[in-house]
Image (cartoon, rainbow, N blue to C red):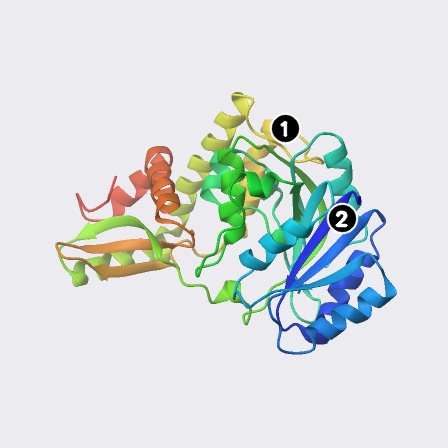
Amino acid sequence: MPHTTVICPAYNRGRAIVPTLESVCRQTMTDWELIVVSDASSDDTDDRVREVAARDRRVRLLRTPRFGSQSGPTNLALAEASGAYIAYLDHDDLWEPGHLRLLAEAFDAGAEFVATRTVDVDATGAVHAVTPALAMVWHPELQLMSPLFENSCAGHAAGLAQRVGGWRESAVGLEDWDLWLRFADAGVRCTTHLDKTVRVLQDPGTRQHSMPCDHRHEIARFDSVLAARAALRTLCDPALAAAEREATRKDVVHWYTALAERGELVFPHGWEGGADALPAAVDAQLRGSADKWRGLVVERHADHVSLSQLLPTMTAEHAARYSAFFRRTMRHQQDFLCEVLPEGSVVR
């Protein structure tokens, strides 16, 4: 029985899948099997996988009926897995040679769920971003409010996914966020590392950049579309950016610090400075964050018009939990909204 089963869902990747598979074959930890689960690929992807499998008997192809997302094929691969642990690799990402060894060391030390840091690259291999150190700090509340980990940097004990209901099908994507949240809800803690062991392809043509967002975090309500659009213009005013960022900073620092003081915050391996390093890490992450209001939408309802933030959550239940936690915890941001938007409009 191999130590780790690697599952790589694939669809019409063709020759480009070969470097991904070879990055597994180059791992310094050699006790693994790789199941490439083809979602009824209609190009030469399966032939390319067979070519790699002919050179390395640890690689095998599992072809499935067409699902259209990673969840169905991944669940079938989980049923075929023989490893004591599971690691995931998307068909367009690459592992550094030490990735599986790092996961294996954590698993052998008792971890059930492990994640490492990623580097975002484009199709030429140029680096565009590195996962901020703060994003590797873990707590169930943080998992509720953010996806945190890409598939390709995560692994878990065999049987754990099935224990919480398996990978769930979704038209909106982010199946990984849904699964990691169910891990957290089941009491599973995540062990994280600051080591950058995964190169994640950021391609505007991939599914994650075209996913619909079916759920909302409602920020404010108005009597008319004109009033809602005026509020949207207010929030997008560059003159307010510094005040909004400071409100966010106060909330996040207070949130993380309170979790640390209760002894609940999981710091990643390689983190230095403990709780004292949190404010600087928050500052660093906020400097690299995208425009917070880019995803706002104005929507008509029967008795009001909403100004809402799009949420890429899989379920309405998750979205409701997100909104309730935000309104309960992010008090400085709520106060900021009340200061700049019309009186009584902010949903609290």
Residue in the image at 82% along x and 52% along y:
27
In what element is the residue under mark 1? helix
Q: Dot 1 surroundings within 10 Å: few (below 14), some, or many (20 or more)?
A: few
Residue nearer the viewer, 275 or 120: 120
Outermost residue, bottom direction? 43
Instruction: Tell me if residue 54 comes above or below residue 44 in the rendering.
Output: above
In what element is the residue under mark 2? helix
The residue singled out by tag 2 in the image is 99
Q: Quadrant of residue 63?
A: bottom right
What x and y, as percent, mark residue 61? 72, 64
Q: Quadrant of residue 20?
A: bottom right
Q: Is residue 93 visible?
A: no
What x and y, as percent, mark residue 32? 79, 49
Mark linked to residue 274? 1
- Quarter holding the N terminus? top right
259 relative to 347 in the view: left or right: right
146 relative to 203 in the view: left or right: left
Tally of numbered discs: 2
Instruction: Tell me if residue 327 comes above or below residue 293 in the rendering.
Output: above
